[in-house]
Image (cartoon, helix red, strand yellow):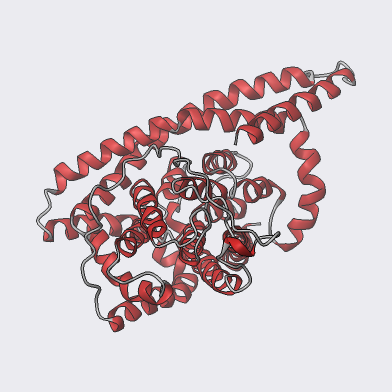
C-alpha cells in the first residue's frame, strides 16, 4: 500500500505539472484544481466518517448482541460437518479445525475484527501439522483461498456506508453480495483442490532438487489479540442439518434475485428485531451488550478517518490532475461493454491490494453526486466491496504469522476467486440494475 499510495500521488502531481506548463491561462490552473481537490477530499473524508459513526455503532451493537447470545457457536456447529470433508488432512478434534470454523463463522456474520485472531490461531495450529516448515500445506492454501473469497453473508460495513451516503435502499446489495460471494467461494474451493495436484508440498521438489531448510527466525509479532483458549465449537450438528442450512442459503439466491426489491426494505428493521429477540431468548442483557458493541462502532468509525483521508486525497489528486481520466477512458471503453463502468474500474483493480483503499474509493464513488449509492455503479462497487477480499493483505498477515515463504498454489486460487467475484458481481448487477445504467 505504501508503493500504491506514493505512486498515485506522484503520478497525479506529474500529470498536473505537465498540464500546468501547457495551461492557456483560462479558468483555474491545473495546480489550483489539484490543490482544491485535495482540500475538499480531506474535509469530505472526515464528514463521511462522522456520518458513519451512528450507523456503524448500530450494526456493531447488534452483532455484539448476536455474538454474546452464541450465534457464532451455532454457525460454527453448522459448519463442522462440512469442514471435516473439505479438510480431510486435519483431524476433526484438532485445535486447528476449531479455530478455522470460528474464523469462517465470524466472517459469515461480518465480524472481521473477530475473524482475524481466529484465522491467525488456525494458521499456527495448521503449522503444527506441517511436515515441511516454511511451505504452505494443502489445508493452509484452501483455508486462505476461502478467506480471500470473502464469505461474508451480511456485509454490515458496506450497508453502513451506503446508509451514511443517503441510500434509499442501503441493504439492496444483499442479493447481489450473496450471489457473488457464493460464486467466488465455490471457485476458491474448486481451484484450490484442483491446483494442489500440480504443486508439490515437498520443498525437495523445488528447482535444483535440494530441500529448503526454513530459516530459524521467528515470525514477526502479530498486532492482534489471539484467543487464549481453543475455540468452543463442540460437536457439530448432524450432517443433514448442515446440508439443510447450506441448501437454504443456496435457495435464497434465486428468491432474493426475483424478490430482492420487495425483501430489501424489511432487512434492516427485521435484522434488528431478530438479533435483539435472539439475544433476549438467550438471556443476554441486550441493552448493556448493545451499548458495548456500539462503543466499538464509534471507535471503528473514528479509527478509519486517517485511512479515508489518505486514500480519498490520493484518489482526488488522481482525478483532479486528469490522470484518472487518461487511465480509465481507454480501459473503461472496453470494460464498459461487459458491464464494468469506467468509474468502477479503479475499485476492481485496487480491491485485492488494499481494503482501506477500496473502502475509500467505494466511498468516493457512492458519495459523488453524479453517481450516488443507488445508481448501477453504486450498487456494483458496493457489491464488489462486500463480495471480494483484500487478497494480498490476508496472505501477508496469515502466512507471515507462521513464517510461510513458499505459497504454492494459494495465490492462484485466491486471485481466481477474486476474478470470479468480480465477474459474478457484474453479472448479477446487470441482471437486477441494468435499468439504472
Number of labels in the image equals: 0
Q: Is residue 357 left or right of residue 36?
A: left
Q: Position of residue 161 (x, y in %)?
A: 45, 43
The foreground one among 307 and 23 is 307
Question: Relative to 224, is 267 above or below?
Answer: below
Q: Position of residue 242 (x, y in %)?
A: 31, 77
Question: What residue is shown at x 79% (from left), y 50% (from top)?
Answer: 331
Q: Is residue 345 left or right of residue 135?
A: right
Q: Is residue 433 something that shows in the picture?
A: no
Question: What residue is shown at x 48% (from left), y 63% (from top)?
Answer: 146
Q: Is residue 326 something that shows in the picture?
A: yes
Question: What residue is shown at x 26% (from left), y 45% (from top)?
Answer: 61
The C terminus lies in quadrant: bottom right
The N terminus lies in quadrant: top right
Location of residue 278 by image quarter? bottom left
Q: Is residue 223 left or right of residue 417?
A: left
Q: Residue furthest front?
A: 210
Location of residue 252 by image quarter? bottom left
Question: Relative to 7, is 262 above or below?
Answer: below
Q: Residue furthest bottom?
A: 240
Q: Position of residue 408 (x, y in %)?
A: 59, 60
The foreground one among 270 and 325 is 325
The foreground one among 151 and 380 is 151
Location of residue 233 by image quarter? bottom left
Question: Relative to 249, is 38 above or below?
Answer: above
Q: Residue furthest left?
A: 283
Q: Position of residue 99 (x, y in %)?
A: 32, 58
Amino acid at each position: 500500500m505504501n508503493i500504491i499510495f506514493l505512486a498515485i500521488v506522484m503520478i497525479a502531481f506529474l500529470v498536473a505539472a505537465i498540464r500546468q506548463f501547457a495551461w492557456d491561462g483560462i479558468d483555474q490552473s491545473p495546480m489550483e484544481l489539484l490543490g482544491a481537490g485535495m482540500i475538499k477530499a480531506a474535509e469530505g473524508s472526515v464528514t463521511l466518517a462522522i456520518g458513519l459513526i451512528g450507523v456503524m455503532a448500530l450494526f456493531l451493537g447488534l452483532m455484539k448482541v448476536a455474538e454474546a447470545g452464541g450465534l457464532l457457536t451455532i454457525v460454527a456447529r453448522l459448519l463442522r460437518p462440512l469442514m471435516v470433508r473439505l479438510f480431510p488432512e486435519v483431524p476433526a478434534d484438532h485445535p486447528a479445525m476449531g479455530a478455522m470454523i470460528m474464523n469462517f463463522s465470524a466472517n459469515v456474520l461480518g465480524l472481521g475484527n473477530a475473524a482475524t485472531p481466529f484465522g491467525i490461531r488456525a494458521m499456527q495450529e495448521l503449522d503444527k501439522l506441517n511436515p515441511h516448515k516454511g511451505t504452505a500445506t494443502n489445508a493452509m492454501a484452501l483455508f486462505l483461498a476461502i478467506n480471500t473469497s470473502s464469505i461474508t453473508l451480511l456485509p454490515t460495513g458496506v450497508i453502513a456506508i451506503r446508509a451514511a451516503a443517503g441510500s434509499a435502499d442501503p441493504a439492496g446489495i444483499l442479493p447481489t453480495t450473496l450471489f457473488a460471494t457464493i460464486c467466488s467461494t465455490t471457485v476458491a474451493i474448486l481451484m484450490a483442490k484442483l491446483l494442489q495436484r500440480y504443486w508439490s508440498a515437498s520443498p525437495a521438489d523445488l528447482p535444483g532438487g535440494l530441500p529448503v531448510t526454513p530459516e530459524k527466525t521467528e515470525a514477526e509479532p502479530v498486532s492482534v489479540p489471539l484467543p487464549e483458549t481453543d475455540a468452543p465449537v463442540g460437536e457439530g450438528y448432524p450432517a443433514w442439518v448442515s446440508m439443510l442450512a447450506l441448501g437454504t442459503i443456496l435457495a435464497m439466491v434465486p428468491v432474493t434475485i426475483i424478490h430482492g426489491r420487495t425483501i430489501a426494505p424489511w432487512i434492516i428493521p427485521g435484522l434488528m428485531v431478530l438479533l435483539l429477540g435472539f439475544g433476549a431468548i438467550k438471556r443476554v442483557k441486550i441493552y448493556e451488550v448493545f451499548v458495548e458493541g456500539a462503543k466499538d462502532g464509534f471507535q471503528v468509525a473514528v479509527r478509519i478517518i486517517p485511512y479515508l483521508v489518505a486514500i480519498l486525497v490520493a484518489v482526488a489528486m488522481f482525478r483532479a490532475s486528469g490522470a484518472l481520466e487518461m487511465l480509465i477512458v481507454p480501459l473503461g471503453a472496453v470494460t464498459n461493454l461487459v458491464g464494468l463502468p469506467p468509474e468502477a474500474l479503479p475499485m476492481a483493480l485496487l480491491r485485492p491490494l488494499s481494503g482501506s483503499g477500496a473502502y475509500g474509493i467505494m466511498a468516493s464513488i457512492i458519495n459523488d453526486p453524479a453517481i450516488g449509492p443507488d445508481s448501477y455503479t453504486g450498487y456494483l462497487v458496493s457489491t464488489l466491496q462486500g463480495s471480494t477480499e483484500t487478497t494480498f493483505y490476508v496472505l501477508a498477515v496469515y502466512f507471515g504469522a507462521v513464517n510461510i515463504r513458499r505459497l504454492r498454489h494459494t495465490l492462484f486460487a485466491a486471485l481466481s476467486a477474486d476474478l470470479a467475484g468480480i465477474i459474478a458481481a457484474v453479472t448479477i448487477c446487470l441482471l437486477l440494475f441494468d435499468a439504472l445504467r
